[in-house]
Amino acid sequence: MELDSGTIAWMLTSSALVLLMTPGLALFYGGQAHSKSVLNMMMMVFSTFATVGVLWVIVGYSLAFGDNTVGGWFGNPAQYFMLSSLLAETVQTDGLPDLAFAAFQGMFAIITVGLIAGAVANRMKFNSWMVFSLIWALLVYFPIAHWVFDLDAGWIASGIAAVDFAGGTAVHINAGMAALVLALILGKRRGWPNDAARPHNLTMVMLGAGLLWFGWFGFNAGSAAVANFSATYAFMNTVVATCTAICGWLIIEQIRDGKPTSLGAASGIVAGLVAITPACAAVTPLGAMAIGFISGLACAFGVGLKYRFGFDDAFDVVGVHLVGGLVGTLLIGFFAWDGSPAGAGGVFYGGGWGQLGIQAIAALAVMVYCGVLTAIIALVVKATMGLRIESEAEAVGIDETEHAESGYDYSGFSAGSSNGVGAPEPVAVATTTDR
């Protein structure tokens, strides 16, 4: 078959959009960090390009999309080693070079690992994070991606036929569960929760949320792998679910706190995007609106779980990604419409309870596998390298101690300006409380 230039253009554009989500995530998390920790937080997210991006080319794509091995738990690691077998123009599927698909899926791997970083802000050794992210991608993400995204061989995708169009299980439940386990093993921030730092730059948070929403169209609509009706369907559902999620989150804030906040709006955006990710090609726009609204409500409540159970999830990766991923994955069992591109029927459309059970099995399998492996990896890194910076270093600021840098240079103000008129040292002002 001849190469289809339209399909190639769509997939390369979608890949670039998903790549943009990682800098967007860095801004989203960086704005929530303390001013003394913003660079470290952004570095933790950006570092996944250096670790996961390289590992994906070497062996990651093989493990995720190679032929089944070891009972189908992961792909053949030698099959696409260094992507060497994809370099011929004739290696294609339906007019799309397999190399383009590998590039697209590589962006998913990078941002999934980056999501975890938000739970361990201000206190994890950077070198330990780099090692953890490499091992976690190798042993956790790549095998689960094989289960979910390999439509021919993955046991979740083809074996039990769970619906997960763009990664509610492989990306969001997976990252959220890893964030929970890593936060528990790493321990709480200094002074948390009584002396928790507020977000230092909410403008940055809002900008990051906007970039995530923009990039998410590549994430969801791009998962159709062609510019067709399925992509259009996923695109529209991604819009409306996110809009209603903002409504749900702000309603909770208004009732609970008396004020809707910009941080709440930004978090509602991400909650809606997370929840609609698995369902975007399986539900009607009405169903997407319902899923988005429910996810806004559920995640707004979910971010409070850390206070009830005492785990320090700094930027609510658990409350947004694990809770939102579960909401979206399970609600497919209720709202799936058999006339959608996904073709599955849920309870509300006469499909019975079977699909809900399948969705629950997929979610539970990812949580258990991820939870156990993440704990083992974190404990090994803790025993060999240590996970946490010293308490004194945490007080000084992780930017200074881990990177010998500062996100903001105040030195020009301390000695006065060039015209001899002094200026006070600027102070980062937070306008909302830590969740």
Image: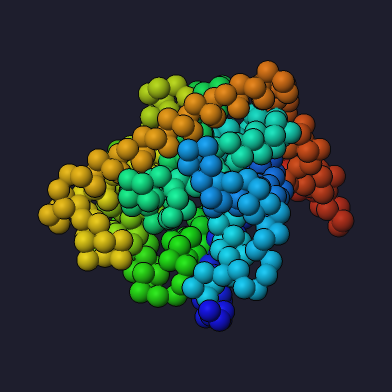
**Position of 367 compared to 99: left or right?**
left
Q: Would residue 117 be visible to someone looking at this image? A: no
161, above or below 361, in the image: below
In the image, 227 versus 286, the foreground residue is 227
Q: Number of marks in the image?
A: 0
In the image, 256 versus 186, the foreground residue is 186
398, above or below 332, in the image: above
Q: Residue at x 44, y 75 (%)?
A: 227
**Position of 225 compared to 84: left or right?**
left
Instruction: Report which quarter residue 12 is drawn in.
Output: bottom right
Q: Residue at x 46, y 72 (%)?
A: 226
Find residue 182 and report its horizontal and vertical position in percent.
55, 28
Find residue 218 and report its horizontal and vertical position in percent.
49, 65
Which residue sits furthest top?
383
**Position of 185 compared to 274: left or right?**
right
In the image, 43 versus 143, the foreground residue is 143
Quadrant that contains the C terminus: top left
Q: Residue at x 79, y 41 (%)?
A: 405
Q: Residue at x 36, y 69 (%)?
A: 230
Find residue 402 and report its horizontal and vertical position in percent.
76, 34
Instruction: Name the colour scheme.
Output: rainbow
Q: Would residue 363 be visible to someone looking at this image? A: yes
In the image, 104 versus 318, the foreground residue is 104
Find residue 176 and report its horizontal and vertical position in percent.
46, 38
